[in-house]
């Protein structure tokens, strides 16, 4: 009982601390304050006294899909480790983790960032990193992914998940990411003209193309409208600016289930992970899944049915951990 | 622990281990997660452990409160959020399925946006023809 009380007290203290809402700084015109307060300081490499060069992080606020809530998206600008991070020619990579629901933090710490966390929970420098020669931007999105959260219009955070207005489609999600990017570049204008690359993995394959389209369309609008929209009034939160979008990359991406799903049985068989009869079992499941996708495309079926076939193999919606009770777990 | 450390030293000579921090390549090939994938989320929530220690030590020495300020989650400015979801799935995922986003073919979005070269690890270029 004593232990649980001791645990509850600090948890309450933690929950009570206010999130760093950087959009409020933009509204006040305090960009210098935003830069200063968002710096990540005090973290060391391993057990040494060497400071970790982590960059800046905080929450950027954007309207929810229906516009009557505020999504506060946790965003981390991770500076390059082996270049001049403020050089406008240094590329900026926007990394879009998949899921849906996998946080950008994961991509940084577990995959491409300059630091990983060891088993003693110390930061260590990663030997192979994408962020050595490029600045990297990691965003927990859509809302309720990672540390990103939603609040009512009055600013009160929504703690009841049943009351959250979740983002329903990638175009809506990436429009919100675009607005975050514009705010980031407002606070850190040294990256405004940097060559921008979008990269993502897994469901990030859906996000990357959509994000490219959002940027492309806004760039086109700004060209048509002239440059006035790129210079909002002092204190106003900008919603558009020209983006120097130059490239896009995807790895193990979700792009087109009708093409991709039928490749799994042969790929797994080729890797030696399943037997011939098991390949046939998977072929049947994914064939049914593809039929369901085609019915959805034709407007005669629902997406959930297609997803159910996919999920019966991988249980993809429960954390990506293949926890058992899946076809994949049974046959491997 | 000794055995684990010994195994790590034996198996961690290659690029895979250096890159992922994991020595269980066979599990990764089976789509299991390397243990290092979990460490970051522990790192980010370590503030609770620090807070407990701080609270206990505060009774003896209030200067220990600085421990709390040095906690990783605070340093990363991730405090104050009611959301602490570490992994994919749940309602964020299901909402995308119900809307049909999950079933979209986004191949042509990439083709439209990037008329030049696109690199994919799993797909052949025929996808875009």
Image (cartoon, coloured by chain):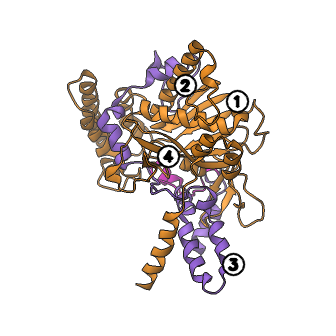
Label disc, if present, on residue B40 of the rendered structure: none
Mark 2 residue element: helix
Q: Give the magenta range.
A: B19-34
Is residue A247 visible to us here? yes
Colour of chain A, in one word, is: orange
Q: Nearer the viewer, mark 1 or mark 4?
A: 4
Q: CA distance from mark 2 to mark 3?
A: 49 Å
A25 is higher (above) or lower (below) than A226: below
Callouts 2 and 1 close, C-beta under 8 Å? no
Q: Secondary structure at mark 4?
A: strand
Cβ–Cβ below 8 Å for labels 4 and 2?
A: no
To the question of a shared chain for discs 2 and 1, the answer is: yes
Mark 1 highlights which residue?
A: A194
Separation of disc 3 and disc 4 at Cα? 33 Å
- The answer to whether dots 4 and 2 both sit on one chain is yes
Residue indicated by mark 4: A72
Residue ID for mark 2: A215
Indicate the position of residue A298 as horizontal and vertical percent values: 25, 21
From the rendered image, report the letter of the chain displayed in purple.
B
Query: Within the image, what quadrant is residue B40 found in?
Result: bottom right
Mark 3 neighbour density, 10 Å: few (under 14) some (14–19) many (20 or more): few
Same chain letter for marks 3 and 4: no
Along the viewing direction, whichever of A281 and A155 lies nearer the viewer: A155
Q: CA distance from mark 3 to mark 1?
A: 44 Å
Q: CA distance from mark 4 to mark 2?
A: 20 Å
Quarter of the figure with residue A48: bottom right
- Residue A275 visible in the shown view: no
Residue A71 percent across, percent down from the top left = 46, 44
At x 48%, y 31%, the residue is A175
């Amino acid at each position: 009982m004593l232990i649980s009380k001791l645990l509850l007290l600090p948890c309450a203290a933690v929950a009570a601390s206010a999130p760093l809402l950087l959009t409020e700084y933009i509204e006040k015109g305090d960009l210098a304050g935003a830069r200063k307060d968002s710096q990540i300081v005090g973290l060391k490499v391993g057990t040494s006294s060497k400071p970790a060069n982590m960059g800046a992080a905080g929450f950027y606020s954007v309207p929810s899909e229906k516009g009557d809530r505020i999504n506060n998206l946790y965003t981390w600008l991770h500076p390059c480790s082996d270049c001049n991070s403020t050089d406008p020619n240094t590329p900026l990579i926007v990394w879009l983790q998949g899921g849906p629901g996998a946080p950008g933090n994961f991509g940084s710490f577990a995959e491409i960032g300059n630091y990983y966390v060891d088993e003693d929970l110390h930061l260590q420098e990663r030997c192979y990193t994408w962020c050595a020669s490029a600045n990297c931007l990691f965003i927990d999105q859509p809302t309720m992914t990672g540390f990103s959260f939603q609040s009512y219009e009055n600013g009160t955070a929504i703690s009841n998940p049943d009351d959250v207005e979740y983002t329903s489609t990638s175009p809506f999600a990436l429009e919100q990411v675009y607005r975050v990017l514009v705010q980031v570049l407002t606070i850190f204008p040294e990256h405004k003209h940097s060559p921008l690359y979008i990269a993502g993995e897994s469901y990030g394959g859906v996000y990357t193309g959509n994000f490219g389209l959002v940027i492309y369309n806004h760039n086109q609008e700004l060209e048509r409208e002239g440059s006035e929209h790129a210079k909002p009034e002092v204190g106003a939160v900008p919603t558009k600016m020209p983006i120097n979008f130059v490239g896009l990359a995807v790895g193990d991406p979700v792009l087109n289930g009708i093409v991709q799903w039928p490749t799994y049985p042969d790929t797994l068989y080729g890797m030696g992970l399943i037997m011939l009869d098991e390949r046939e079992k998977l072929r049947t499941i994914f064939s049914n899944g593809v039929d369901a996708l085609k019915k959805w495309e034709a407007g005669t079926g629902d997406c959930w049915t297609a997803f159910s076939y996919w999920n019966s193999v991988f249980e993809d919606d429960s954390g990506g951990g293949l926890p058992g009770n899946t076809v994949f777990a049974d046959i491997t | 622990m000794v055995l684990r450390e010994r195994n790590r030293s034996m198996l961690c000579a290659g690029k895979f281990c250096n890159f992922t921090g994991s020595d269980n390549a066979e599990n990764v090939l089976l789509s299991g997660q390397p243990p290092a994938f979990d460490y970051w989320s522990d790192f980010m929530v370590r503030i609770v452990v620090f807070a407990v220690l701080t609270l206990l030590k505060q009774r003896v020495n209030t200067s220990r409160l600085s421990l709390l300020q040095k906690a990783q989650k605070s340093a990363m400015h991730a405090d104050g959020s009611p959301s602490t979801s570490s992994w994919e799935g749940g309602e964020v995922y299901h909402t995308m399925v119900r809307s049909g986003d999950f079933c979209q073919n986004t191949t042509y979005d990439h083709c439209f946006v990037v008329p030049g070269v696109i690199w994919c690890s799993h797909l052949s270029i025929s996808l875009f023809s």
